[in-house]
Amino acid sequence: MSRSVASPAVGKPWYREPWPWFIIGLIGAAVLASFATLWIAVSNPDPLVVEDTEYDTIRGELRAQEHETASDPGTAPGEGERGDGGA
């Protein structure tokens, strides 16, 4: 009598399956996108205020506006141009 022994199911190796490659591709795309973002950030830096003259000009304009608002006798403190207390 010969008995037929069922051999265990042998699957394909992992590199023959499509899903590991899909996941590896997603991770690779994320890495490439991060390097592209880094390259864009390094090649186009934000402009910095190098001289204090711009800052001083803006600060002076803000102070002038504060003085105008504070010296206006018709408005109470905290009231803007609308005169309703900002509500």
Image (cartoon, rainbow, N blue to C red):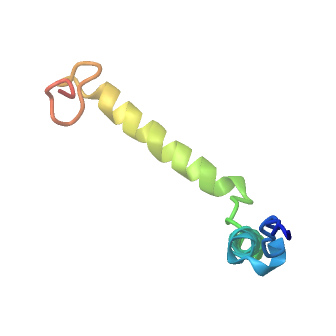
**Residue 11: percent from the left, percent from the top?**
78, 71
* Location of residue 34 with respect to 16 vertically, above or below: above
In the rendered view, tell whether residue 45 sits above or below residue 56: below
* Lateral position of residue 43 relative to residue 78, left or right: right
For the view shown, which residue lies furthest in the bottom direction?
16
Where does the image place residue 60, in percent across and percent down from the top left? 52, 44
Q: Could you tell me residue 56's position as x and y percent?
A: 61, 48
Number of labels in the image equals 0
Residue at far top of view: 76
- Figure check: 20 above or below 62: below
Task: Find residue 24 and report its horizontal and vertical position in percent.
Answer: 76, 71
Report the residue at 79% width, 66% height from top: 6
| The C terminus lies in quadrant | top left
Residue nearest the viewer, comparing 1 with 54: 1
State the residue in front, 6 or 31. 6
Residue occupying image coordinates x 84% and y 74%: 13
On the image, which quarter does residue 82 sit in?
Answer: top left
Q: Quadrant of residue 68?
A: top left
The quadrant of the picture occupied by the N terminus is bottom right
Residue nearer the viewer, 86 or 60: 86
Residue drawn 20% across the image and 36% down it: 81
